[in-house]
């Protein structure tokens, strides 16, 4: 770590951010932090950006944690690799505090899993959440006095997932991600790790309460997107049509490349960001026209191969979080889902497409292929909202007299 080099070249960093149209407030946060480093560089003897970041986290408020990690990640990449910030989502530079509190033994387990996962080309998001959850699990064991996995008892494993009264405090996904780490290649510790897997509790699967668009909401969104007076940009309108007619995931929209639009065959062909499976979707005219209008009339001139770009320099690819923000614009422009607590993400469009196709009588394998599911059972959550066919299974209550007061309650 060369803080002196960072400070000497910090003007280049701030100038780049200003030229790239970062907000004044955002640039000022970096400027203030650089002044703090310059003022205190002699007092604090730190040997890495990780140490400096952790020290600043201890001095800050909890809600500032994410911003501080991001800021020091920018400093580290700029000073060590000469990389300027580009609005793209980068891998985590600094581990969460839990990992840093682990003993060398438990840290080694997490690191061995990471090497194994990267060698087997696991998704970065999967690796990140498995590292985080397993670090919390190992910290729990470490706090109970364990220095290895060899003698861990079942009651101590179970205490991580439930209170003494049996109340669940962590669910199936937590168990699954910890099991992924323990089942990976952990060298001479694998035999102990497999034993811990057998001690993990049986957690029943909970059925999700799937949110879906009502017919009125669906019509309002479609009418807004199709209107000549649509208030959205051409980019946001094209993304809206993609969501509405294909149910494609936000991550896949953000990662969609120009060459994955097959104009000759009227198809979208890409390998899914989440599952890695190949996905083929029909490029229906209304979607194709919206994408073409964006490319020909609004998309910035750029060598970037991603389809959807930020509208401001340096014109990098959108993030999945930006797609979520665009969804909010779509709901607002349509006048739907504006009540406090209403879900406003992109996933509702997947639910809508699944229930619509089911209501039209499409076979379940066709719907699963359209949504790009890797597991057929995943569709069962969506079909619970298929009101059209669920009504056909409803039983009549004519044979059971019920007073009118019941329906008025």
Image (cartoon, grey):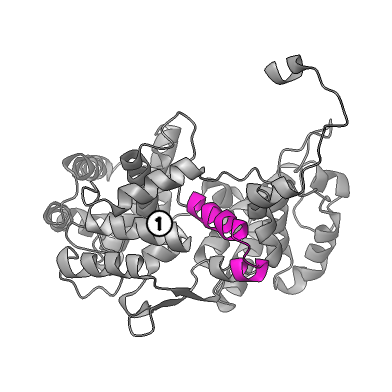
Secondary structure, mark 1, is helix
Q: Residue at x 36, y 59 (%)?
A: 241
Q: In this view, does 114 lie above or below 23?
A: below
306 displayed left or right of 380: left
Q: Which residue is drawn at 21% across and 47% down?
A: 229
User: Could you tell me which quadrant the C terminus lies in?
Assistant: top right
| Residue 13 among those drawn in magenta | no
| Residue 350 among those drawn in magenta | yes
Q: Is residue 255 above or below residue 104?
A: below
- Locate residue 5, reporting x and y percent: 21, 59
- CA neighbours of label 1 inside 10 A, class few (<14), some (14 to 19), many (20+): some
- Locate residue 107, reporting x and y percent: 62, 59
- In front of the other: 253 or 53: 253
To which residue does mark 1 refer? 320
Tag count: 1
125 displayed left or right of 77: right
- Locate residue 27, reporting x and y percent: 19, 45
- Locate residue 256, reporting x and y percent: 37, 70
**Outermost residue to the bottom:** 264
Magenta region, main secondary structure: helix
344 displayed left or right of 100: left
Q: Picture quarter containing residue 376?
A: bottom right
Q: Is any atom of residue 83 visible in this view? A: yes
- In front of the other: 29 or 244: 244
Q: Residue at x 87, y 28 (%)?
A: 400
Q: Is residue 193 above or below residue 52?
A: below
Q: Give the range drawn in magenta.
A: 347-368
Q: Is any atom of residue 90 visible in this view? A: no
Q: Residue at x 59, y 77 (%)?
A: 120
User: Could you tell me which quadrant the N terminus lies in?
Assistant: bottom left
């Amino acid at each position: 770590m060369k803080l002196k080099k960072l400070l000497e070249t910090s003007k280049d960093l701030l100038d780049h951010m200003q030229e790239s149209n970062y907000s004044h407030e955002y640039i000022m946060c970096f400027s203030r932090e650089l002044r703090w480093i310059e003022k205190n560089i002699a007092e604090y003897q730190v040997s890495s950006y990780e140490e400096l970041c952790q020290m600043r986290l201890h001095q800050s408020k909890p809600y500032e944690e994410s911003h501080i990690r991001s800021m020091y990640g920018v400093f580290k990449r700029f000073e060590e690799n000469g990389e300027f910030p580009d609005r793209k989502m980068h891998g985590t530079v600094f581990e969460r505090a839990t990992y840093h509190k682990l003993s060398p033994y438990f840290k080694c387990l997490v690191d061995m899993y990471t090497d194994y996962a990267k060698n087997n080309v696991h998704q970065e998001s999967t690796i990140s959440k498995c590292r985080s959850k397993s670090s919390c699990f190992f910290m729990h064991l470490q706090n109970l006095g364990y220095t290895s996995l060899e003698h861990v008892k079942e009651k101590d494993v179970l205490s991580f997932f439930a209170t003494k009264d049996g109340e669940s405090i962590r669910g199936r996904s937590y168990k699954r991600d910890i099991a992924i780490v323990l089942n990976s290649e952990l060298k001479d510790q694998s035999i102990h790790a497999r034993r811990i897997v057998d001690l993990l509790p049986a957690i029943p699967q909970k059925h999700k309460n799937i949110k879906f668009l009502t017919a009125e909401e669906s019509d309002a969104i479609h009418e807004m997107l199709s209107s000549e007076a649509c208030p959205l940009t051409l980019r946001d309108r094209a993304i809206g049509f993609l969501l509405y007619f294909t149910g494609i995931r936000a991550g896949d929209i953000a990662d969609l490349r120009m060459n994955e639009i097959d104009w000759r065959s009227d198809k979208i062909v890409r390998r899914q960001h989440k599952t890695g499976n190949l996905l083929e979707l029909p490029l229906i005219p209304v979607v194709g026209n919206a994408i073409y209008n964006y490319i020909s009339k609004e998309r910035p001139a750029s060598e970037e191969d991603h389809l959807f770009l930020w509208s401001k320099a340096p014109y990098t690819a959108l993030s999945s979080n930006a797609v979520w923000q665009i969804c909010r614009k779509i709901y607002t422009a349509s006048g739907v889902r504006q009540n406090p607590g209403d879900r406003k993400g992109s996933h509702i469009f997947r639910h809508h497409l699944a229930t619509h196709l089911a209501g039209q009588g499409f076979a379940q394998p066709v719907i699963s292929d359209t949504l790009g599911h890797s597991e057929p059972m995943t569709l069962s959550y969506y079909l619970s909202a298929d009101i059209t066919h669920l009504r056909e299974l409803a039983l009549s209550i004519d044979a059971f007299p019920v007073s009118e007061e019941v329906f008025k309650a």
